[in-house]
Image (cartoon, rainbow, N blue to C red):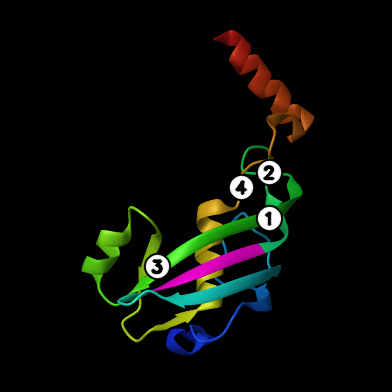
């Protein structure tokens, strides 16, 4: 669903339940159900999207290949610019994307954030299955 930023900037916070099935990272199981809360602010020559995403992710640990559930909770501010030049100027302060027509897809934003912030491994290596844990311990002791 495409969101019109100029319309959303006039409104307050919005919350949507998302069911994501496409373009997910390989280690995130589909379907992926998340809650996205967002607010759009007009900043003159760009829009600032404050995005909060939460929910339980079913992941495949890329270390031990076991499935685990991770309580995902991520907040990000994204500058939506009309040109690459403006986006480059704002990169020091925000994540940036370019949208010439002031439209974005909340689903695409959330999937992109999963690529950046969803963990690829168990939060602690001790949570990996015992066989892999033993191999990792033996390699560390060898050094």
Frontmost of labels 4 and 1 is 1
Residue 119: which numbered mark, if any? 4
Q: Earlier in the sequence, mark 4 or mark 1?
A: 1
Label 3 sits on residue: 79
Of circles 3 and 2, the one toward us is 3
Q: Is residue 55 left or right of residue 136?
A: right
Q: Residue at x 55, y 52 (%)?
A: 117
* Residue 70: percent from left, percent from top: 73, 51
The crowding category of the residue bearing disc 4, from other C-alpha atoms within 10 Å (few below 14, some 14 to 19, many at least 20), is some
> Residue sitting at 67 percent across and 18 percent down?
137
Secondary structure beneath disc 2? loop
Q: Which residues are magenta?
A: 47-53
Taking the image as shown, residue 77 lies to the left or right of residue 72, namely: left
Q: Position of residue 10 (x, y in %)?
A: 50, 87
Distance from disc 4 to disc 3, alpha carbons, whole Å, reads 24 Å
Sequence-wise first label, 4 or 3? 3
| Disc assigned to residue 72 | 1
Disc nearest the viewer among 3 and 1: 3
* Label 3 – label 1 distance at C-alpha: 22 Å
In the image, farthest residue toward the top: 142
Pointer 4 with pointer 3, Cβ within 8 A:
no
Residue position for label 2: 65
Which of the 4 image quadrants contains residue 57?
bottom right
Label 3 sits on a secondary structure element that is strand
Q: Residue at x 46, y 75 (%)?
A: 41
């Amino acid at each position: 669903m495409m969101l019109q930023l100029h319309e959303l900037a006039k409104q307050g916070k919005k919350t949507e339940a998302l069911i994501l099935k496409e373009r997910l990272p390989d280690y995130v199981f589909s379907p992926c159900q998340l809650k996205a809360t967002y607010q759009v602010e007009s900043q003159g020559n760009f829009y600032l999207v404050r995005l909060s995403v939460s929910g339980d992710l079913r992941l495949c640990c890329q270390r031990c290949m076991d499935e685990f559930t991770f309580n995902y909770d991520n907040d990000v501010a994204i500058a939506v610019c009309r040109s690459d030049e403006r986006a480059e100027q704002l990169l020091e302060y925000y994540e940036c994307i370019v949208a010439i027509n002031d439209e974005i897809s909340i689903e695409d934003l959330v999937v992109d954030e999963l690529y950046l912030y969803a963990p690829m491994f168990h939060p602690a290596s001790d949570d990996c299955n015992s066989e892999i844990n033993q191999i990792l311990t033996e390699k560390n002791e060898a050094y």
